[in-house]
C-alpha cells in the first residue's frame, strides 16, 4: 500500500517532473507531521506512513502545470496544505464511521482510541493552517471556506434529507461538500499559484469539484463491489454503518416489487446490518448484482465527462491530456 496514485500521464517529461515534485512534497509532509513529543509524531505520522494515493497534492501539481510557474514554492506548500487537511479529516472520519481499517493499517481510533484520533486530527489541521498562512490571506480565506464546506457536508451526511427533498440530490450535496470541496481547492490552489489566468483558475476549480464528487462516488461503489480489502479499508463498511451511498439510494427509490427483499434489508428501521453478519452478507450480495451498481457507475462516468468538457479552457497539450486522463482514472478506478 505504498503512497502514490499511478500517474495517468503519458508525456514522459511531464511524468518525470511530477514524480520528482511529488517526492519533494512527500519529504515536506514527513517534516510537517513531526510533533514535539514522540507520541504525537507517532500518531500524526501513522496514516501518512500507512500509504494513501496522494490524489489531492498530485492534482495541485498537475493544475499548476496550466500556468507559467508550476515550480513556484507556493505550489509545493499548497500541495502539503491539502494533503494535511485531508489527513486530518480521515482521523475524524474514522471516529465518526467507527472504521477500524484505513490504508491497510489500523485506524487511529482502533490503534489508540477516539480521543487520540480526534486530537491528532486537530493537530494535523493546525499544521495545515500554519502552512496556509505562508500562502497569504486569500489562500487562508479559501482554506477556511473549504473547511466549512467539508464540515457542512459531513454534518449533512448525518441528517435525513429535508421533507420533500430528493434523497439522491441530498446525497450528491453531501458528497460535493465532504469531498468535492477540498479537491476543487486542490485544483484551484495549483492553478492560482502556478500563475494560470483567472479563466483557467475558474475552470480548474469547477473541474476539481466534479472530479472530487466523482472520486467519492467511485469510492462508495468500490466499498460495495470490492471482494477484498484492496482499498485498504474494510469493504461493506458503509452498508454496515448505514452510511448512504448512491447505489443504495437508487435501490431504495425503486418501485420494482423484485427489489422488496433488498429494500427491507437496507431499511435501518427493519434490519440492523451491523448486528447480523449473515444479513449484511445477503444485502451486499444482492446489491452487488443489482442494476443500481451499473446506474451509479454510469452516473460517475457522465460526471467525469462533464469535468473533461471544462478543460477546453486550457490549450491542447500534455497537461490537458493528463487532466483528462485523471478524470477518467477517477471514474473507472478499481482501487
Ligand atoms: C471520507 O468520507 C470523509 C471525508 C471526505 C471528509 C470528512 C470530514 C470531517 C470528518 C470533518 C473534518 C475535520 C477536520 C479536523 C479536518 P467516507 O467516510 O465516505 O470515506 P471513507 O470510505 O474513506 O471512510
Ligand atoms: Mg469513512
Ligand atoms: Mg465518513
Image (cartoon, helix red, strand yellow):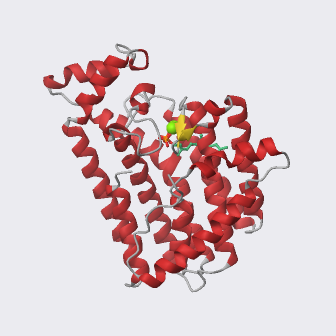
Identify whether 44 is placed above or below 106.
below
At x 63% / y 64%, what residue is drawn? Answer: 26
Q: Is residue 192 visible?
A: yes
- The spot of residue 299 in percent (x, y) is 28, 51
Identify whether 181 is placed above or below 280.
below
Farthest top residue in view: 270
Q: Is residue 87 left or right of residue 304?
A: right
Among the 4 quarters of the image, the one containing residue 308:
bottom left
Identify whether 124 is placed above or below 202.
above
Tell which of 3 and 237 is nearer to you. Answer: 3
At x 31% / y 40%, what residue is drawn? Answer: 225
Question: How many numbered discs sit on the rendered protein?
Answer: 0
Farthest right residue in view: 36
- The spot of residue 36 in percent (x, y) is 85, 49
At x 53% / y 75%, what residue is drawn? Answer: 18
- The spot of residue 170 in percent (x, y) is 41, 39
Q: Is residue 65 visible?
A: no
At x 41% / y 26%, what residue is drawn? Answer: 240
Q: Is residue 9 left or right of residue 288?
A: right
Tell which of 32 and 313 is nearer to you. Answer: 32
Q: Is residue 134 left or right of residue 190?
A: right
Which quarter is ligand 1 in?
top right
Identify whether 42 is placed above or below 328.
above
Among the 4 quarters of the image, the one containing residue 28:
bottom right
Tell which of 201 and 42 is nearer to you. Answer: 42
Amino acid at each position: 500500500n505504498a503512497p502514490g496514485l499511478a500517474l495517468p500521464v503519458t508525456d514522459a517529461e511531464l511524468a518525470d517532473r511530477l514524480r520528482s515534485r511529488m517526492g519533494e512534497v512527500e519529504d515536506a509532509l514527513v517534516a510537517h507531521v513531526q510533533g514535539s513529543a514522540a507520541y504525537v509524531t507517532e500518531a500524526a505520522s501513522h496514516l501518512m506512513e500507512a500509504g494513501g494515493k496522494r490524489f489531492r497534492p498530485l492534482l495541485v501539481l498537475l493544475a499548476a502545470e496550466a500556468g507559467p510557474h508550476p515550480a513556484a514554492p507556493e505550489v509545493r506548500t499548497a500541495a502539503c496544505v491539502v494533503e494535511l487537511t485531508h489527513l486530518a479529516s480521515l482521523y475524524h472520519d474514522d471516529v465518526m464511521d467507527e472504521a477500524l481499517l484505513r490504508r491497510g493499517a489500523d485506524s487511529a481510533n482502533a490503534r489508540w482510541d477516539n480521543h487520540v484520533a480526534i486530537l491528532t486530527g486537530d493537530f494535523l489541521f493546525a499544521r495545515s493552517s500554519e502552512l496556509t498562512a505562508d500562502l497569504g490571506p486569500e489562500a487562508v480565506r479559501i482554506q477556511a471556506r473549504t473547511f466549512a464546506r467539508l464540515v457542512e457536508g459531513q454534518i449533512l451526511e448525518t441528517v435525513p434529507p429535508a421533507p420533500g427533498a430528493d434523497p439522491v440530490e441530498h446525497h450528491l450535496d453531501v458528497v460535493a461538500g465532504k469531498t468535492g470541496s477540498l479537491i476543487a481547492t486542490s485544483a484551484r490552489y495549483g492553478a492560482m499559484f502556478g500563475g494560470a489566468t483567472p479563466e483557467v483558475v475558474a475552470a480548474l476549480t469547477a473541474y476539481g469539484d466534479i472530479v472530487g464528487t466523482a472520486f467519492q462516488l467511485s469510492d462508495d461503489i468500490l466499498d460495495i463491489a470490492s471482494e477484498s480489502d484492496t482499498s485498504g479499508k474494510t469493504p461493506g463498511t458503509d452498508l454496515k454503518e448505514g452510511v448512504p451511498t448512491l447505489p443504495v439510494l437508487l435501490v431504495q427509490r425503486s418501485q420494482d416489487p423484485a427489489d422488496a427483499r433488498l429494500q427491507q434489508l437496507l431499511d435501518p428501521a427493519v434490519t440492523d446490518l451491523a448486528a447480523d453478519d449473515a444479513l449484511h452478507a445477503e444485502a451486499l450480495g444482492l446489491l452487488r448484482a443489482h442494476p443500481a451498481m451499473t446506474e451509479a457507475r454510469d452516473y460517475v462516468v457522465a460526471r467525469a465527462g462533464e469535468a473533461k468538457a471544462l478543460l477546453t479552457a486550457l490549450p491542447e497539450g500534455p497537461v490537458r491530456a493528463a487532466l483528462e486522463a485523471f478524470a477518467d482514472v477517477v471514474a473507472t478506478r478499481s482501487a
